Image (tube, grey):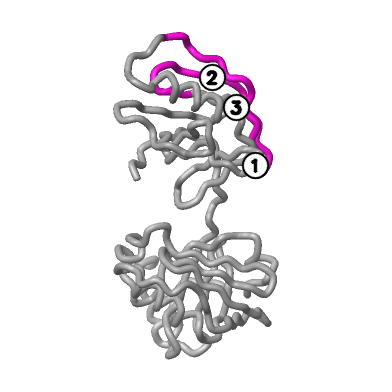
C-alpha cells in the first residue's frame, strides 16, 4: 500500500508542476553540404501533396543530381537542368530549363510539382542517409525527401533482347529463342539460344573484358539459330564497355558499336 501511495503522489506532483514524461526531443538534422550532395543520384521518395502510388508509377522514378554548381532533374519524361547554390544549409536553384515533351500522366503533373518545389529557397538537411528539402517558409510549398540511388551493377542475371549481327547492326533476338547471361564472381555464363557458354570476365568502372568463352556443341535446328549463337558469343568477347540506363544493360565494342542489349531477369520490358 505504501508503494502505491508513493507512485500516486509522484504522479500528482508531475501534474501539479506541469511536468510531463515525454521522450527527449531528437536533435535537429545537420545541414547538408555540397560534398555530401554531389557524386550521387538522389531518388525522390516522397513529395508533399503527391500520392505515393502516383510517384511509383513514374517510369524510371524522379531523380536529382548535383555536380559543381549544376543541378539536373529527371521526372520520367523530360530532362531538366539549372544551377544551384548551397549556403549554410539553404539550397537555391535557378529556374529549371530542359526538353519540352508533353508527358503522359502522372509524369507531367509530378514533373511540374518538382519544378515548383525547386523554385523556392529550401532548407537542406541530411539524416540517416536521406536528404530532406524543406521550404524556408512552410507556406511556399511541399517537402521533398530523397535517398541516394545505388550505382548500377553488371552482376546478376540478364535476359538478352538484342545481339549484333556482325555488321554494325543490333538485331532483336529470333522468335522462339531465349538468350541469357549472368555475371557473378568473375564468371559469365548463360544460354546462347541453344548451347550454353561459360568464361571469365573482369570489370573496372565502366570497362568490361570477357575472355574466350567455352560452349557446348549441340547442333540446333531452326533457321538462323546457329548464326545468332555465333554472333552472340563473338559480341560478348568483343565487348569493352558496359552501361545500364532505364534498367537496360548495353555492351559496346571499342568503336562504340552496340553489341548486346539485355534487361534484368524477370523484367519483360
- What's the magenta region? 190-218
Mark carried by residue 237: 3
Using a 10 Å C-alpha cutoff, classify the residue at mark 1 as few (fewer than 14 neighbours), some (14 to 19) or many (20 or more): few
Q: Is residue 151 above or below residue 169?
A: below
Mark carried by residue 46: none
Q: Is residue 194 left or right of residue 168?
A: left
Q: CA distance from mark 1 to mark 2?
A: 25 Å
Q: Return the x and y of residue 15 as percentages of the image width and height.
A: 39, 83
Q: Is residue 201 above or below residue 161?
A: above
Q: Which of the two discs, 1 and 2, sits closer to the camera?
A: 1
Residue 198 is a magenta residue: yes
**Residue, disc 1:** 255
Q: Return the x and y of residue 88 as percentages of the image width and height.
A: 67, 81
Dot placed on the residue nearer the N-terminal end, 1 or 2: 2
Q: Is residue 155 left or right of residue 61?
A: right
Dot placed on the residue nearer the N-terminal end, 2 or 3: 2
**Residue, disc 2:** 198
Q: Which residue is drawn at the image coordinates 58% and 20% (left, top)?
A: 199
Q: Nearer the viewer, residue 163 or 129?
A: 163
Q: Nearer the viewer, residue 263 or 121?
A: 263
Q: Which of the two discs, 1 and 3, sits closer to the camera?
A: 1
Q: CA distance from mark 1 to mark 3?
A: 14 Å
Amino acid at each position: 500500500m505504501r508503494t502505491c501511495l508513493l507512485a500516486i503522489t509522484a504522479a500528482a506532483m508531475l501534474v501539479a508542476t506541469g511536468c510531463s514524461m515525454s521522450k527527449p526531443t531528437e536533435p535537429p538534422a545537420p545541414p547538408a553540404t555540397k560534398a555530401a550532395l554531389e557524386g550521387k543520384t538522389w531518388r525522390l521518395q516522397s513529395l508533399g501533396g503527391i500520392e505515393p502510388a502516383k510517384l511509383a508509377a513514374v517510369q524510371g522514378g524522379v531523380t536529382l543530381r548535383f555536380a559543381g554548381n549544376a543541378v539536373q532533374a529527371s521526372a520520367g519524361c523530360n530532362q531538366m537542368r539549372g544551377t544551384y547554390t548551397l549556403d549554410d544549409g539553404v539550397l537555391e536553384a535557378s529556374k529549371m530549363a530542359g526538353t519540352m515533351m508533353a508527358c503522359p500522366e502522372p509524369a507531367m503533373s509530378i514533373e511540374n510539382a518538382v519544378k515548383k518545389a525547386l523554385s523556392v529557397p529550401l532548407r537542406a538537411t541530411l539524416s540517416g542517409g536521406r536528404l530532406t528539402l524543406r521550404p524556408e517558409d512552410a507556406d511556399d510549398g511541399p517537402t521533398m525527401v530523397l535517398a541516394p540511388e545505388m550505382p548500377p551493377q553488371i552482376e546478376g542475371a540478364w535476359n538478352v533482347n538484342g545481339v549484333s549481327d556482325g555488321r554494325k547492326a543490333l538485331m532483336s533476338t529470333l522468335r522462339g529463342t531465349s538468350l541469357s547471361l549472368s555475371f557473378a564472381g568473375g564468371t559469365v555464363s548463360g544460354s546462347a539460344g541453344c548451347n550454353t557458354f561459360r568464361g571469365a570476365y573482369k570489370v573496372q568502372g565502366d570497362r568490361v573484358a570477357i575472355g574466350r568463352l567455352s560452349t557446348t556443341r549441340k547442333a540446333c535446328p531452326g533457321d538462323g539459330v546457329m548464326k545468332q549463337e555465333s554472333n552472340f558469343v563473338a559480341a560478348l568477347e568483343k565487348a569493352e564497355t558496359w552501361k545500364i540506363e532505364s534498367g537496360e544493360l548495353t555492351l559496346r565494342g571499342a568503336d562504340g558499336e552496340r553489341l548486346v542489349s539485355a534487361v534484368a531477369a524477370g523484367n519483360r520490358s
